[in-house]
Image (cartoon, rainbow, N blue to C red):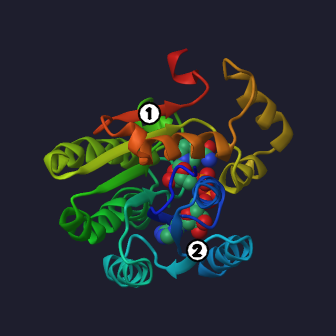
Amino acid sequence: NPRLEHKTALITGAASGIGGAIAELFAREGAALALLDVDVAAAAALARRLSDAGHHALAVHADVSDAEQVQHATAQALEALGRIDILINGAGINVFRDPLTLSDVDWQRNLGVNLQGAWHCTRALLPSMLEAGYGHVVNIASVHGHKIIPGSFPYPVAKHGLIGLTRALGLEYAARGIRVNSISPGLILTPAAERYFQSCPDPEAERLRQAELLPCKRIGTPEEVAYAALFLASDEARFINATDLLIDGGRSQL
Ligand code: NAD
């Protein structure tokens, strides 16, 4: 049987990379999906492709840093799907700056999208999850939420916060059927990672250097993160709460 049969999920950042891979896997596993993204054209294209393949998916638009847009998009998703069992907070952006020249706008954008965005979406769906006595939230954090890699400021500030949000909220509603966990991917080959490589003077050399840093000598794939999200969002993980799962090929242990 499909593992998410009769389940509904809202996935943010669903139009690309990790969120996109989670959408594809969850659809194959039988979930009805709301694909939330600021790039609603790309989310709609994916929803169409999944629907054409016989799955149930719709696209909704929001910039997750904007609470009002999130409220509107989640209300639309709730109306279309009836209820949301699973929330995947996947929307995120890389903000890597020199601390001394970092602008307030970039500081705020980093926290607004990478941390507050997850809170906005969770807060919008919590009341209906609490009413149902059932809900799973999976936040896509990062290895940067565990280990500081020089040159990555202020991104780790938001990702540490996201792991804190996971632990705090997980305890808050544990007795009422809500679980909150996070996944911390290491380097994963997504369009965002590709943009990073292309920003380097020698993209190919940087790609090889990054792979060489990993114990398994290769960069991860979005599907490898999606399988973990599937497990955490499934009822098989029902005793797993308020914790974080590193998916980094073992790099953080070096
Ligand atoms: P990506 O750029 O390929 O996809 C991110 C998606 O989020 C895009 O569709 C984008 O339109 C959407 N998005 C961005 N800002 C948004 C906003 N304000 N509101 C709504 N949607 C927005 O990136 P990715 O590499 O797949 O990253 C997904 C998540 O995984 C992010 O939270 C990122 O921090 C995290 N992550 C990625 C890696 C990696 O190596 N790729 C590693 C660790 C963590």
Q: Is residue 149 visible?
A: no
Mark 1 C-beta to ligand 1 under 8 Å: no
Compare residues 149 and 251 and report the one nearer the observer: 251
Residue 39 percent across, percent down from the top left = 60, 76
Residue 148 percent across, percent down from the top left = 45, 31
Task: Estimate how packed mark 1 is, as few (under 14), some (14 to 19) or many (20 or more) residues with alpha carbons within 10 Å.
Answer: some
Residue 231 percent across, percent down from the top left = 49, 41
* Residue drawn 80% across the image and 30% down it: 208
Q: Which mark is residue 57?
A: 2
Are dots 2 and 1 in contact, CB under 8 Å?
no
Side (left or right) of 101 relative to 211: left
Compare residues 189 and 235 and report the one nearer the observer: 235
When asked about the image quadrant of residue 58, the answer is bottom right
* Residue drawn 71% across the image and 31% down it: 210
Q: Is residue 244 above or below residue 32?
A: above
Spot the residue most to the top. 254
Residue carrying label 1: 245
Side (left or right) of 15 relative to 230: right
Which amino acid, mark 1?
A: Leu
* Residue drawn 42% across the image and 70% down it: 64
Q: Which mark is residue 73?
A: none
Quadrant assignment for ligand 1 = bottom right
Q: Is residue 147 above or below residue 11?
A: above
Side (left or right) of 236 relative to 195: left
Compare residues 129 and 189 and report the one nearer the observer: 129
